[in-house]
Image: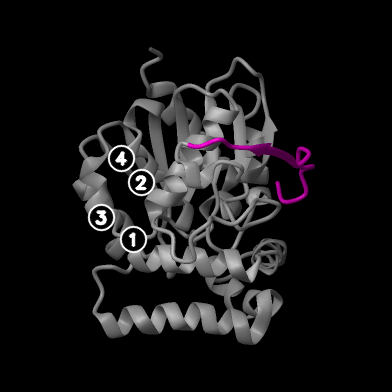
Amino acid sequence: MTKTDLPELKRVTINGPTADLAGLVIGYREAGPANGIPIVCMHGIGSNSSGYRAQLAGLSDTFHVFSWDAPGYGVSSQLPWSEPRPESYADALAGFIDALKLDRIIVIGSSFGGVIAAAFAARYPQRVRGAVLSAPAAGLSRQPADKRRAALEGRIGDMAKLGPEGVAKARSVALVAPGSPPEIVAAAERLVASVHPEGYAQAAHTLDMADTIAVAPKIPGPTMVVVGEKDIVTPADTCARPIHARLHNGRLEVLPGIGHLVKLEAPDTFNKLVRDFANSLPRA
């Protein structure tokens, strides 16, 4: 799946839902039938729209699949705030699906993208058929101030000191399970190396302020949480399990032998879980 051709990169300009977001450009990739149920995928802090290559290929036989470049990533404009909150990205997602004239979506978010997906599902429940949180980040707002400061300064400082390629070499191996095939490790490294430092810094501030565990009970609709057993970036015991425990209508899937990048390491399994979840949702 790492060698599957990607759909062309497109751009759309959004007009809201707030005046601050009018004119924001979002890059995205799209595959599948126009009348299919829309699935919108959001990547992690070290990725871009191409990180969902296997989902654009593997789910587009039935579903209308979109993968965006988050604001500040790929060809997308940065958000107008230096320290945006999760709701800022959720509002940008609302503007994105409005611009594409999408109705009720299945929203998928990986890691940092899971923070956005949870915020969107809680803030715009009428726009969501169901949510898939893959290796969701819990956020750092519950941590002591010194740990939050160290984590934030570490992320931004490493990016300033090492640059995207240096951060990719230093951190990519932790994103996948030990013993992962070299092509999977290389794919993870390419994704991290593609980030823009300014967009990465905005996302780092968002993770610092996020509390996905507190957001979880505000999500009324069906939500599937997927996590790799070997995930050391957003471990199941501190992220996926407590998030799942607070959901009203939740399902938890723990994949043995898999690390943080579930959609990349186990694309066929991940796609089957998403397909089964989507097919279980009410059609109305």
Q: Residue 176 appears at what percent x and percent y?
A: 55, 65
Q: Which mark is residue 213?
A: 3
Measure the alpha-carbon separation of dots 4 and 1.
Answer: 13 Å
Q: Is residue 10 shown to the viewer in this render?
A: yes
| Image quadrant assignment for residue 179 | bottom right
Measure the alpha-carbon separation of dots 4 and 3.
Answer: 12 Å
Which is closer to the viewer, label 1 or label 3? Answer: 1
Q: Which residue is mark 2?
A: 119
Is 203 left or right of 242, judged from the image as shown?
right
Q: Is residue 263 part of the magenta span, yes or no?
A: no
Q: Secondary structure at mark 4?
A: helix
Kind of residue indicated by mark 3: Ile
Q: What colour scheme has been applied to the protein in the rendered image? A: one colour
Sequence-first tag of 2 and 3:
2
Check if mark 1's residue and mark 3's residue have beta carbons within 8 Å. Answer: no
Q: Quadrant of the C terminus?
A: top left
Kind of residue indicated by mark 4: Ala
Q: Which mark is residue 261?
A: none
Check if mark 4's residue and mark 3's residue have beta carbons within 8 Å. Answer: no
Which is closer to the viewer, label 2 or label 3? Answer: 2
Q: Residue at point 24% right, 69% down?
A: 142
Q: Which mark is residue 122?
A: 4
Q: Residue at point 44% right, 65% down?
A: 83
Q: Which residue is mark 1?
A: 210
